[in-house]
Amino acid sequence: MTGAAGIGWYGVALAIVGGALRVSTPYLFVSLGEVLTEKSGRVNLGLEGTLLMGAMTGFAGATLTGSPWLGVLAAGAAGAAFGLLHAAICNLPRVNDIAVGIALFLFGIGLAFYLGKPFIAPRAAMLPALPLGAWSDEPAVRAALEISPLFLIGAALAVALQWGIANTRLGLLLRMAGESADAARALGRSVNAIRTLATTAGGFLAGVGGAFLSLYYPGNWNEGLSSGQGLMAIALVIFARWSPLRCLWASLLFGGASALGPALQTVGVTSGYYLYSAAPYLLTLVLLVYSSSTRHALSGAPSELSISR
Amino acid sequence: MRSTSGSAVDRTGLTGSAAAQPAHRASSWPVARVYVEPLEALVLSAGALAVALVLFGVFVALGGRNPLAVYSALYLGGFGTRFSIEGTLTQASPIILTALCTALPARVGLLVIGAEGALVIGGLCAVLVATAVATASPWVGTLAALLGGALAGALWIAAAGALKHWRGVNETIASLLLNYIAIALFNHLISGPVRDFSQTLKAQSWPVPDAFRIGSIPGWSVHWGLVIGVCICIILFVLIRHTTLGFSMNVLGGNRRAAQVAGLPIGRLVILACLMGGGAAGLAGAIEVLAVHGAASESLIVGFGYTGILVAFLARQNPLAIVPVALLVGGISASGGLLQRRFDMPDATTQVLQGLIFVCVLASNALAGRWRWFARSP
């Protein structure tokens, strides 16, 4: 993005594309995790806490083992543990899943800051970048097209999930728990077990998304690392109408919106910096208002979901 | 709002209508379920608190510290000395009001978590109003600034309620997004249009006139905002318990269908609850500005709104119970400094404890209604 100033407004567009590719990855992983969870009929509003736990664990893991990929794995494990905790509490009778999510959101942030205190450092072993822009001589193009392997993994995962949820036995079970718990029970399936599995897997993905924050971009661990990506991802899922593939496009859109402020700053537009930083939130709210209705559930929403009705 | 007809249903082809399930229908407007009898609520909350404290003890013991010493420091830092009690009361004052921002909409079945945004907007508008009426007499100026802040917060949260009622937008997500939008708006204004450029170290707004500042309760270094908060809680408790309006709100929160059948003005009740809750949070921001900071700055954004959610749930959305619970949670927050100094613990320690308490309180709902003894008690 450093070269953008030299090439003017073309650079702004390029910086937004680059930013979209870079910033979208945590959105993508968290929203895919949330899709899995919500398809099973539960909402996990605590993924912001999970994201930060993942970021902290990933950074600590990479620092301690020296391998960023082990850090990613550790982050996933921490996220899965948080998902399991959410599921275990929600399996109790008369417990509200949204409220538990808020509680785990606060708990996860506190725990990440507490355990991460000794690890606050400028750098750990970073994830490598794939220089897909190497063909170009323009440094801005190269910077924009430097892509994290995690983004490609996430994109592949979105396609795989899209296919898997629609076409596999496991996907059918997942949808059944989300669309009609009674039907699942009638077939002798444990709704709680399916939801526990889905929430745990969703937590794993959110944890990996956190590892991207601390190990790739911005690539350090501090207490201001996440600016609510985990929360926005939940709104993003509604926007993507519970489709993993649409989550991919929505993540790119959100990433681009997040990159708007910094990109404009590079060409000297600094006055409305904070307002531009509100762009993704405003975008989410507008889209939410646009797509909601009082007369029917959101199209594509799992019927058992409390948040969509 | 509730109808699940349309494309959402029947994608598995296994069932006719998912709406034919009384058990999960109740979860559509979920918060009402936390109402339990007062005595049972007290026992459950106290039990959850005890479990959370034990878990926290295990947690600090794993970190190689003596849990008993940490407990005693928690007590000392929150309630042990006059100085710490004053700190606790000052912390509790905004939390009491932000908790109302979750508790009041919860009475009509909404789960609103937008207190942080309403507080920030309230603080900002208090500054704007105070600047606009800078020549007014002290009492009038203070009152105008407080009302301005409360009104701004009220409208901010009412927007979430209105979107819920007329557009079916999930109020939890909407209020959360409004938090971020409020903070962005706040940062934009205090770093430019309303910035006090004589302050070079940090971005803060114009100061409120000194004459409008809220002072301390005589003999204490605690500002009058605490008294305002407690009075509002008492008034709202009476309103909810002993008026037709409160009864209507409880009916709506308990059973939306019954409220519809009874012909209650659902839209008006929803908006009113949001107005009152948001007004309380906006007032919290105005009081923080007028009594503590003297200007709107980033010091307002310290998570009072999020702590308020915890307090509201621990108090089981009861305005009167919010006061002691806010004192307790405020005490935990206030003891953070002592824990940091004495045990070299991170400042997030109190956040961990609060998170544990929140989780335990929610899990304790699973036990509500289990004991017949409570059902028989008057």
Image (cartoon, rainbow, N blue to C red):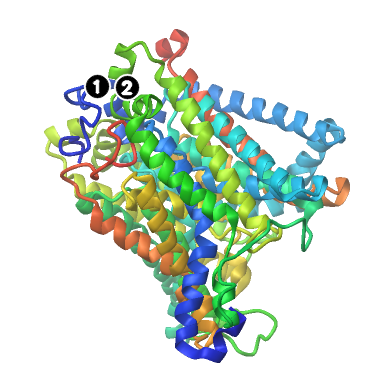
Above or below A89: residue B350 = below
Q: Quadrant of the N terminus of chain A?
A: bottom right
Amino acid type shown at disc 1: Gln
Instruction: Classify mark 1: helix, strand or loop.
Output: loop
Residue visible at 34% across and 41% down in the picture: A307
Instruction: Classify mark 2: helix, strand or loop.
Output: helix
Q: Where is residue B151 in the image (x, y as percent from the top left)?
A: 36, 66
Q: In which quarter of the image is the C terminus of chain A?
A: top left
Q: Position of residue A147 (x, y in %)?
A: 57, 63
Residue visible at 34% across and 45% down in the picture: A243
Depth check, front residue: A103 or A64: A64
Depth check, front residue: A218 or B306: A218
Q: Distance between the residues labelled 1 and 2?
A: 9 Å
Q: Mark 1 points at which residue?
A: B21
Q: Is any atom of residue B121 visible in this view?
A: no
Mark 1 in CB contact with mark 2 (< 8 angstroms): yes
Q: Which chain carries label 2?
A: A
Q: Position of residue A287 (x, y in %)?
A: 30, 59
Q: Mark 2 points at which residue?
A: A181
Amino acid type shown at disc 2: Ala
Above or below B35: residue A228 = below
Q: Which chain carries label 1?
A: B
